[in-house]
Image: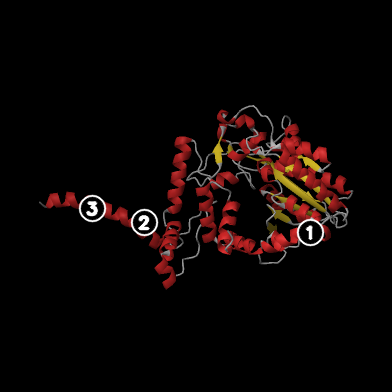
Amino acid sequence: MAGKNKIITAPIIVAFIAMSFPLLYAFVKKDNKPNLVGIVISDKKPEFNSENWLSGLYQREMDDYNNDHWSLKEISVRLNNQFYYKAFNQIRVNGFVIGKEDYVFSESYIFSAYGDDFIGEARIKSQMEKAKVVQDSLKRHGVDLLFVFAPGKGEYCTEFIEDKYKHPVKNTNHAEFVKQCKNNGVNHLDLYTYFNLLKPNTKYPLFPKFGHHWSYYGEVLAVDTIIRHIENLHHTQLPEIFWEKTDVVDTARSRDADVLKSMNLYANPEQNMKLAYPEILFEQDSLKNRTRVLTISDSYWYGPVYMGVPSQCFAGGQFWYYFNKVIPSPIPGEKVEVWELNLKEELEQKNNVVMLLYSDGNLGAFGNTFINDAYEMYTSPSTYWARMEKNKSIQTYAKQIRNQPGLLKKSTQKSADLQISLDSAIKLDAMKLAGVK
């Protein structure tokens, strides 16, 4: 009987230890916040009070908080992602897929390359007609407007896209924007075509295998070209960017493996691409660094910001991320958004050049609302200022959502559930909070 009891008891003990392990691990591991990239985590514990308890809000938010701070969450996510990567050649990064030879792509940029997201000739023509009005209005104040079309990885690296995405191309947003810029006399720089001209003879990759944006080397070439173009457009001199030494390595630096970080794998794959990193220097001439350039852009401009271009070459010009977040903030220690600024004063009195730089995957929303807002401001100022005042409450709540992880997580989930952009989900939640239907 004693032997039989041991046989029965052993599995029970093992099961008990297995079930208790997460609790014991959580007790030993004091910091249970998972180190995962690209996942919104609820940092603040829900507030316990009678109202939250009786409504059930506290219980729901506490479940969400505990799920985020579960002691084994990070390792579980990484092992799960590793399994999908190895077994099915899939990456668990929202909107991203793997192509041939381990190249990662934003799926929307593949669609852009083949014109699947084409917004139509009439819409682009209308936007560029408005842009011409804005350009002429700014020019009367001595300010130049410049549109820069940045290349996307989908179009540049088509040879590494899976065949299931490929089909004949009828038209693309990029091709139509360039056409309408020419037709309407809108100042533009087509880096998209420039990169394709460089491609056959470039010494180093202009797009990395595990990155979403152009490579650091490609970024440096792009910045150098932009500087020279602005000099010709605005009839001025800007500090030059130059380099004498270039490091060539097989492990990505800077943002050249930004998607790899977001893949949150247990063990990263080997990086077998030689990437170039020029050791850049800026010409130190205060007389040249007087042309203030405001850049409205998508995430492609973050690289030049990290590089120091705005301060070293653009006289401290700001970066308005998606025409929303102001970088650097004009109020130290506070997050400031574009809607909180006086657009007319910013454009006419504080800047010499206004540059919109968007990659092809974002051309469907080129400039976000900048073109329409600036056009209305110059052609119908009374309706523009009235609309801005009316929307302040919604914008205030939208900013609150963006800055609070708990609220942002709910909007992120709504975005996934409704298959809409995160900005659209945030706006819906902000309208609800503001009592606007």
From this view, report whether residue 12 is shown above or below residue 277. below
Q: How crowded is mark 2: few (under 14 residues within 10 Å), some or many (20 or more)?
A: some
- Left or right, 176 with reference to 34: right
Of the two numbered discs 1 and 2 in the rendering, the one whose residue sits closer to the viewer: 1
Alpha carbon of mark 3 to alpha carbon of mark 2: how far?
17 Å
Crowd tier of the residue under label 1, counting other residues whose Cα lies within 10 Å: few below 14, some 14–19, many 20 or above: some
Tell me if mark 3 has few (under 14), some (14-19) or many (20+) residues whose alpha carbon lies within 10 angstroms of its own. Answer: few
In the image, what residue type sits under mark 1?
Pro
Could you tell me which residue is drawn at 72 percent across and 64 percent down?
330
* Colouring method of the image: secondary structure
The x, y position of residue 35, in whole percent, is 50, 54
Residue at the farthest left position: 1
- Residue 282 visible: yes
For marks 1 and 2, give the CA distance. 61 Å
**Does the rendering let one see residue 36?**
no
Label 3 and label 1: CA atoms lie apart by 76 Å
**Residue 381 bears which disc, if any?**
1
Q: Are marks 3 and 2 in contact (CB under 8 Å)?
A: no
The mark found on residue 12 in the picture is 3
Q: Earlier in the sequence, mark 3 or mark 2?
A: 3
Residue situated furthest bottom in the rendering: 50
Kindly identify which numbered label has been placed on residue 308: none
Location of mark 2 (residue): 22
Q: Which amino acid does label 2 sit on?
A: Pro
Q: Of residues 252 and 193, which is closer to you in this image? A: 193
Q: Mark 3 is on which residue type?
A: Ile
Q: Earlier in the sequence, mark 1 or mark 2?
A: 2
Q: In this view, does 40 lie to the left or right of 197?
A: left
